[in-house]
Image (cartoon, grey):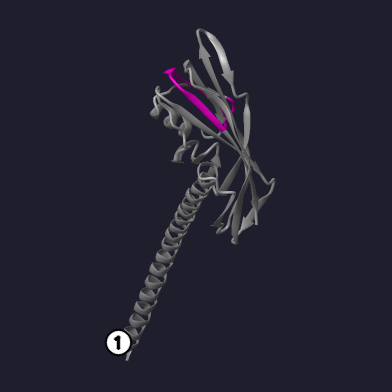
Amino acid sequence: MFQQDRRGANETIGFVLVFSLIVLTVGVVLTAGYSGLQDARDAERVNNAERAFDVLADNIEDITHREAPSRGTEIRLAEASIGSGPPTHINISGFKNGSRVFTTGNYSTDSVVYRAEDTRIRYAGGAVTRIQGGGSTLLDPPGFVISQNHTIIPTVKLLVEDRTVAGAQTVLIRTDRSIREVEISENGGVDTLQFNVSTPAPDAWNGYLEGQGMSCTRTDQGSDRAKLSCTLEGVERVKTVWFLIEITFE
């Protein structure tokens, strides 16, 4: 009789241990799996935003290069936000025989910024950049043509609705052309072409402009902004075209 009681106790203890092990294993799997699912969701959310901004850049190029009057771009926020962001400042100047022969003055262009956790995707000055972890990368370059034979710099100035949309809805980014004009057409060429840009994404711009053959120096202007001064020597023809694009959110 006592042996049967001990067997019953052993079976009960064994059941409790096995059940506890199963509960513990399920808990560990759920915890790790949920974290992994969150990471995958966050990565896919940012990837979707990058694709949407690629479309936005293409749509603005339709306006600036192919005379389209307006375009619309849809983006699903998925617990993120989109709205206007810090401006980018651009100045283009040409020098000949030690004297400045032209300058565009300082353009101040708004930006469209998608924010999710510590990641920002922004469109400003014709470029799409990603800012994360104190650095920035170029996702879509501005449509510049930079060479010593012929340099064409289209400058896209944005007037972005002062508004931020957040949540999980789908937002329509509407872009409308207001002005297009040739700012500078210097067929005689310049000894030095200088391109200055003040931006929260200096790493991205620096890599792009130096990749186009320009020499750049950087001056930090705070934790979230730097100024790049880039030059190209011996340019035979220079043309800058100025576009004004209005952006609203629906």
Of all residues shown, which one is farthest toward the bottom? 1
Q: Is residue 70 visible?
A: yes
Image: 203 above or below 112: above
Image: 91 above or below 33: above
- Residue 64 % position (x, y): 54, 42
- Residue 237 % position (x, y): 46, 22
Of all residues shown, which one is farthest toward the front? 187
Q: Is residue 82 visible?
A: no
User: Based on the displayed image, in which of its 4 quarters is residue 225 positioned?
Assistant: top right
Look at 56% across and 25% down and name the residue there.
184
Mark 1: give few (<14), some (14-19) or many (20+) Cα within 10 Å: few
Look at 50% across and 31% down and name the residue there.
153
Look at 56% across and 15% down and name the residue there.
101
User: 10 left or right of 221?
Assistant: left
- Residue 71 % position (x, y): 57, 52
Of all residues shown, which one is farthest toward the top? 97
User: Based on the displayed image, in which of its 4 quarters is residue 6 positioned?
Assistant: bottom left
**Taken as a whole, is the magenta stretch helix, strand or loop?**
strand
Image: 53 above or below 182: below
- Residue 22 % position (x, y): 38, 72
Q: Amino acid at mark 1?
A: Gln
Question: Is residue 90 or residue 71 the one in the foreground?
Answer: 71
Image: 48 above or below 109: below
Question: Is residue 154 or residue 171 the one in the foreground?
Answer: 154
Asked if residue 12 lies in the magenta stretch, the reply is: no
Q: Which residue position is annotated with label 1?
A: 3
Question: Is residue 99 or residue 165 the one in the foreground?
Answer: 99
Q: Quadrant of the C terminus?
A: bottom right
> What is the magenta range?
221-241
